[in-house]
Amino acid sequence: MGIQREIIKNDQKATNVFAQKHNVSRTKRGEVLGSRGGFRGCTIWFTGLSGAGKTTISFALEEYLVARGIPAYGLDGDNVRTGLNKNLGFAPEDREENIRRVAEVGKLFADSGVVALCSFVSPYNNDRELARQLHKSVGLPFFEIHVATSLEECEKRDVKGLYKKARAGIIKGFTGIDQPYEIPVNPEVTINTENRTVDDCVQQIVEILQENDIVPRSAVEKVIDLTVSEANLPKAIEEAEKLPSVEITKLDCQWLQVLGEGWATPLTGFMREREYLQCQHFNCLLDDGVTNQSVPIVLPISTEDKEKLAGCKQFTLRYNGVAKAIIRDPEFYEHRKEERCA
C-alpha cells in the first residue's frame, strides 16, 4: 500500500518564461554523437535501498556503453547532493524536490542524445512516476530499474556504515529503517543482486535496451540462441509439418546449426540481401553498429522452389526429409554471377 503524504505542487513560479526550441534536432545530434550513429538518448532510473548496488551497476553500465561508442553519464545520489542538491535534506518534501531536479537533469541529458543513468534511492512511487511522466511528455524513453536487494543483505554490506548508525539512532529518517520504501509497481527491470556478478546484472539491462532499440544488437555480448527448447519442441515440429517445405544440403544444414547455436550472433537467420552485400563489400555487418563478418551465411534456393514458395510467409527446411527449421518472412534475392571486362 502506498504511503499517504502531502504532495508539493510542481507549479511554475517564474513569469515571462518561454520554452525555446533548438535548431538542432534529436536525429541530427544522434548522427554526430558517439560512434554508433542514431539517437539513443534515454533515462535509466535505478531505485532501491541504500547499499542495494544501484551505483555499482549504473557505473558498470556506463562503462559498458561508452566502451561501445554509446554516450552515457551516471548521476549518483551522493554526487548530486554535494552540488546541485546540497541545500536539500532527507525529509519527504526534500526527497521529492531532490528527485524532481534530478529527473529534469536526466531529461536534458537524454534529449541531448546521452543515456542518463540515475542512481537514487527515490523511495516514493509518486516521485518516480513524476520522473517518468517528465520524459513521456516530450517523447523520451524512460526505464525504471528496481535493484531489489533485500534489507537484510543491504545491512550485511553496509559499505558506508549508515545502517549501523540508523539502528543506533544516530541517523534519523533513513529509508528502510525509520522511513518507508515503496516497491515499484511495474518496473521495466527487477534485479536481485545477491549471488550474481555485476556483469550479469549489466547484461540483463542491456538486453532490455536492445529490445527497445537503445543498444544495437552488435553491442550485446549474450549469444543469440535460436534453437527451440525441449518444452516447445513438439509444438514446433507440429507447426513445421503443416508448412510448405524445401530440401537443403548437408552444407546448408551445417550452417543452420551454426546459426541456431548462436555462433553467428548477431545474425538471427540466413543473411538477407542487405546483410549479404555488406558482408561481401565491407567484410562486416553495418546495421545496428559494426560487427566483423567476412563469411557470407546464405541459403541457396532453386528457381523451382522459389516459385513454389511464392507468397508464403513461412516454410520448413528439411534435411533428408526431416524438419530442421522454419524460415519466417522470407526474402528471395538474386545471386548474380556475371562476367567483367575492363
Image: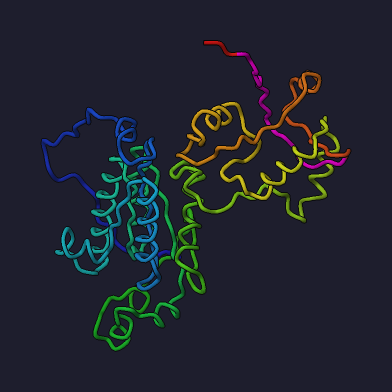
Color theme of the render: rainbow
Q: Is residue 236 above or below residue 7?
A: above
Q: Position of residue 106 (x, y in %)?
A: 29, 49
Q: Is residue 96 above or below residue 169?
A: above
Q: Position of residue 111 (x, y in %)?
A: 30, 40
Q: Position of residue 2 (x, y in %)?
A: 42, 64
189 is within the stretch colored magenta? no
- Which sits in the foreground, 2 or 141? 141
Question: Which residue of the protein is positioned furthest toward the right in this rendering?
Answer: 321
Q: In this rendering, would 4 be left or right of 226? A: left
Q: Is residue 314 above or below residue 216?
A: above
Q: Position of residue 126 (x, y in %)?
A: 36, 57
**What main secondary structure does the magenta stretch of the protein show?**
loop
Splitting the image into 4 quarters, where does residue 135 fall? Answer: top left
Question: Which residue of the protein is positioned furthest toward the bottom in this rendering?
Answer: 168
- Which sits in the foreground, 147 or 7? 147
Residue drawn at x 40%, y 77% as measured from the top left? 154
Splitting the image into 4 quarters, where does residue 309 fall? Answer: top right
Q: Is residue 109 above or below residue 199?
A: above
Q: In this rendering, would 288 be left or right of 333? A: left
Residue drawn at x 28%, y 40% as measured from the top left? 112
Query: How many numbered badges does the structure rendering display?
Result: 0
Residue drawn at x 47%, y 47% as measured from the top left? 219
Question: Which residue of the protein is positioned furthest toward the top in this rendering?
Answer: 342
Q: In this rendering, would 217 be left or right of 71? A: right
For the magenta stretch, what is the residue range? 322-339
Splitting the image into 4 quarters, where does residue 179 fall? Answer: bottom left
Residue drawn at x 74%, y 31% as measured from the top left? 314
- Which sits in the foreground, 51 or 258? 258
